[in-house]
Image (cartoon, rainbow, N blue to C red):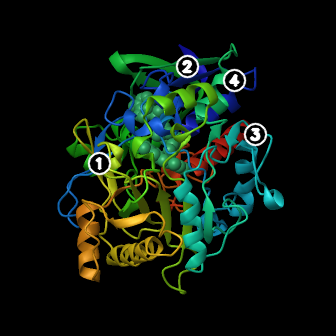
Amino acid sequence: MEYDYVIVGAGSAGCVLAGRLSADPGVSVVLVEAGGRDDKLEIRMPLGFSKLFKTPYDWNLTTAKQGEMAGRELYWPRGRVIGGSSSLNAQMWVRGCALDYDQWGIPGWSYEDVLPYFRLAERRVGSNHGGVYGTAGPLYVSDLRSPNVTTAAFLKACEEIGLRRLDELNGPSNEGYSPTPVTQDRGRRWSAADAYLRPAMKRPNLTVITEASVDRVVIEDGRATGIEHSGGARIRARREVILAAGAVGSPYLLMRSGVGDGAELHDAGVPVVRDLPEVGKNLQDHLSTGAFVSCTKPVTLTRAESVANLLRYLVFRSGMLTSNVGEAVAFVRTSPEEPAPDIELVYAPVPFVEHGLKPPTGHGMTVGVVLLQPESRGRVGLNGRDVVIDPAYLSAGVDLRRLTAGLKTAKQILATNAMKPYAGGPMPPYTSPESDEEIAQWIRDRAETLYHPVGTCRMGVDEASVVDPSLRVRGVAGLRVADASIMPTLNRGHTHAPAVMIGEKAADLIAQS
Ligand SMILES: Cc1cc2nc3c(=O)[nH]c(=O)nc-3n(C[C@H](O)[C@H](O)[C@H](O)COP(=O)(O)OP(=O)(O)OC[C@H]3O[C@@H](n4cnc5c(N)ncnc54)[C@H](O)[C@@H]3O)c2cc1C
């Protein structure tokens, strides 16, 4: 059990790495994944993703009690399956804007530097104004095949309140509104595994091990020499171990391997190999709230799961079951002082309540409100063998102020003439809060994750950062982290696209070293 490269985690970034590194027949690669195969219908069928929540395909995580969120413990789904979170995400391909990468201030990671890696990944099917997308990559970026009739009304409503129609959502600026480009191929989810892993599986130099949870990285004399997985089995790495276990899994594994805050490791009973206090810190997530109203016509996704729709999907790969729920978006600034959009509005032609875990009670529509640049910072930590997730939502007061302003814009959209043919009254449990205080309370009581944690293995040029700009863990040879955890700050977009870009760039950095 010895390979040149040992990759931990077959998620968005891990699949890219396995595909790209194994393209060189002169190296051997093993990809180790805690979850199992991704052949379930609800993975392939776009609307099925919330059916995977709280099943064996999901790590089913829970945050610590959130002091500013009415003491709630929030549910965090994360993919535990081949494809990782790209196998159960909402398929929205939203890179963010140029500033998101320029603001990192890291040589080699400016917008101009990372743009070629996004384009390398993309296989755009659909409009491509200005040639912003790549068209020859392995990852399909398509338009929805059967957008809901109310989604067109939402787009008109954005126009009505003075927002700008974007030619393409994924250009250097994303201020304005647009239908959502999705990672689908002809109505079927196209995960990172579909794009990168499956085509590479027949290579003799790539081994994929599933249902093997990695316990720790083995570090000997300051060098990562392999990993130990479920039951104590060891795999040796001749060249490198690459952690791609995600924003929770990667810092957790570093800490379990003795790399982290010395005092915290000591308390958790883990011998300290390298004191690196920032491991697990700097946790950021997109917090989301929303306004919903009933729909006066029976046209929304509420009854999407009919036999007719299932047949339409299975035979034609079209119809409501190809919806990704978040069918259109608008990026807005809540004040002219903001350098770029600070709020995203996500339109869903269904009342999307409690992660879609409960079937909707009637026809309705949601305008989700997402805080794009939270100033709150949380942490992933250890409590013995258990992981502690504390996003510290709303611990920075400005976050609540921005979300409050964003919710007012959502309400404004629902009240437009364009929405009139569909928008009815407020739908329970939404109470249509009016004053700033009522809105703030609604947010504290109801806001949820938009599933975008990042930042817990922060990349930086400074010595305190967890990984350097080549993604090498500081102070441990032969060990890199390459996934969403290395992002110093969140993008004003969604996090699958940057995770794929990070996988692409990491593969290049590794091949060059
Ligand atoms: C429900 C949901 C909806 C989302 N919607 C969108 C969206 O529409 N658009 C968007 O851009 N982003 C979306 N995201 C976020 C996006 O999918 C993630 O940010 C992205 O997939 C993260 O990629 P990653 O490589 O960092 O981690 P992941 O893709 O999470 O991969 C980590 C992998 O490592 C494995 N792993 C972890 N620990 C271990 C271990 N100890 N041993 C072995 N394997 C391990 C996991 O099982 C997993 O397969 C969503 C996420 C979720 C959960």
Indicate the secondary structure of the residue bearing disc 3: loop
Is residue 396 positioned above or below 447 on the image? below
Residue 271 in the image, given as x and y percentages of width and height: 29, 37
Query: Residue type at mark 3?
Result: Gly
Indicate the secondary structure of the residue bearing disc 1: loop
Between the residue at mark 3 and the residue at mark 2, the CA separation in whole angstroms equals 22 Å
Q: Nearer the viewer, residue 157 or 437?
A: 157
* Residue 439 seen anywhere in this rendered image of the structure: yes
Between the residue at mark 1 and the residue at mark 3, the CA separation in whole angstroms equals 41 Å
On residue 205, the disc is none
Quadrant of res 459 = bottom right
Whether disc 3's CB lies below 8 Å from ligand 1 is answered no
Q: Earlier in the sequence, mark 2 or mark 4?
A: 4
Residue matched to label 2: 208
Between the residue at mark 1 and the residue at mark 2, the CA separation in whole angstroms equals 42 Å
Query: Residue type at mark 1?
Result: Thr
- The residue sitting at 31% across, 69% down in the picture is 394
Q: Are marks 3 and 4 in contact (CB under 8 Å)?
A: no
Asked whether, in this view, residue 452 is left or right of residue 426, the answer is right
Indicate the secondary structure of the residue bearing disc 4: helix
Residue matched to label 3: 137
Around disc 2, counting alpha carbons within 10 Å, would you say few (fewer than 14), some (14 to 19), or many (20 or more)?
some
Q: Quadrant of the C terminus?
A: top right
Q: Earlier in the sequence, mark 3 or mark 2?
A: 3
Mark 1 or mark 4, which is nearer to you? 1
Query: Residue type at mark 4?
Result: Pro
On residue 199, the disc is 4
Q: Are marks 1 and 4 in contact (CB under 8 Å)?
A: no
Residue matched to label 1: 361
